């Protein structure tokens, strides 16, 4: 008869169903056997400690211990799907760069009416009177060279990252739409004398789009909250760092642009929305973005001709 370290003496021939150098590991499994009514004992063994049962109970004991081990084993952490990245992401940023340069060059060269700049400014009072196109034309205007240069650099980079993730056509289409909505909201809710220009609203819409889409992809993962929330937290930190600096910074427009971008990113990250977008060619989305800007300028300049 086996003299147990723990448990009760066994009546039949003892068989080891679990061996470990840690007594606590044997005690955990002994608790499992107690729960299912299998007599057992823990005894010293060359490898440390052994969990023993009667020979006629060995198969049943091993079955329960195997189930316990399977339930106890933590599931492997899920990994975010690896995205290959769209190879033409640079093209969207290149077109953004060209549009932002072409508009001031055209106005400065006298290709449009003398008041073309004034016709494109996002004027809250005029937007409320129905001149919705100003919400889009203002994205292509800047107060000076440094303002333009900052938006060229930031927008090209964030647009490239968003284009790698979503494709350049989809990324820039949602950027233009969400930035336009942000300017419309500011025009409707802001003070009437308020006037603004600049692509920074689009820059932060792109940042919000990118951050929310990446967060929505990481959120279901079985990982620490810091890993799952990192994309969105990082986007908010960048908004606070880049979107509030400068004497004439339009913080409201930046926050609204970021918020609208986040909303779009959350929606298009759904599997159903991704399936719909997959059927739309990138070229179609990109052309739609350019048509929105071109159509807005047509509406702004048409009364002058």
Image (cartoon, rainbow, N blue to C red):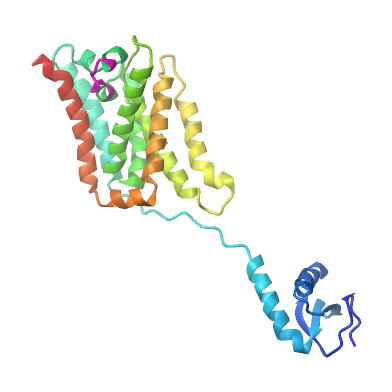
**200 left or right, relative to 283:** right
The span picked out in magenta is 128-135
| In-front residue for pair 239/89 | 239
- Answer above or below: position of 13 versus 173: below
Residue 128 x, y percent position in the rendering = 29, 16
Q: Is residue 133 magenta?
A: yes
> In the rendered image, which quarter is residue 301 located in?
top left
Residue 296 x, y percent position in the rendering = 20, 25
Question: Residue at image x 66%, y 75%?
Answer: 66
> In the rendered image, which quarter is residue 121 located in?
top left
- Answer above or below: position of 138 versus 174: above
Question: Residue at image x 77%, y 89%?
Answer: 55
Question: Residue at image x 50%, y 51%?
Answer: 220
- Answer above or below: position of 35 versus 153: below
Q: Can the viewer see residue 299 in this picture?
A: yes
Q: Residue furthest left?
A: 305
Classified by dominant secondary structure, the portion drawn in magenta counts as loop
Q: Can the viewer see residue 154 in this picture?
A: no
**30 left or right, relative to 9:** left
Residue 138 x, y percent position in the rendering = 27, 21
Quadrant including the N terminus: bottom right
> In the rendered image, which quarter is residue 113 located in?
top left
Q: Is residue 32 magenta?
A: no
């Amino acid at each position: 008869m086996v003299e147990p370290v723990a448990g009760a003496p066994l009546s039949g021939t003892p068989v080891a169903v679990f061996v470990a150098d840690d007594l606590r590991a044997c005690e955990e499994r002994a608790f499992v056997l107690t729960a299912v009514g299998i007599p057992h004992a823990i005894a010293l063994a060359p490898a440390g400690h052994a969990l023993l049962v009667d020979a006629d109970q060995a198969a049943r004991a091993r079955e329960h211990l195997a189930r316990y081990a399977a339930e106890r084993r933590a599931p492997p952490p899920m990994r975010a799907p690896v995205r290959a990245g769209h190879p033409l992401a640079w093209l969207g940023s290149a077109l953004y760069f060209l549009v932002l340069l072409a508009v001031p060059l055209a106005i400065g060269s006298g290709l449009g009416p003398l008041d073309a700049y004034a016709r494109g400014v996002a004027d809250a009072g005029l937007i409320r009177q129905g001149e919705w196109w100003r919400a889009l034309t203002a994205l292509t205007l800047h107060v000076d060279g440094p303002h333009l240069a900052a938006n060229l650099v930031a927008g090209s980079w964030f647009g490239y990252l968003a284009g790698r993730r979503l494709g350049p056509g989809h990324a820039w289409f949602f950027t233009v739409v969400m930035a336009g909505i942000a300017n419309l909201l500011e025009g409707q809710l802001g003070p009437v004398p308020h006037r603004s220009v600049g692509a920074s609203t689009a820059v932060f819409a792109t940042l919000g789009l990118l951050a929310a889409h990446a967060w929505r992809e990481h959120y279901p993962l079985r990982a620490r909250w810091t890993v799952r929330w990192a994309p969105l937290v990082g986007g908010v930190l960048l908004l606070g760092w880049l979107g509030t600096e400068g004497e004439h910074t339009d913080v409201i427009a930046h926050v609204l642009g970021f918020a609208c971008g986040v909303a779009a990113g959350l929606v298009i990250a759904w599997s159903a929305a991704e399936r719909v977008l997959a059927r739309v060619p990138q070229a179609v989305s990109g052309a739609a973005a350019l048509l929105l800007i071109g159509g807005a300028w047509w509406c702004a300049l048409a009364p002058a001709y």
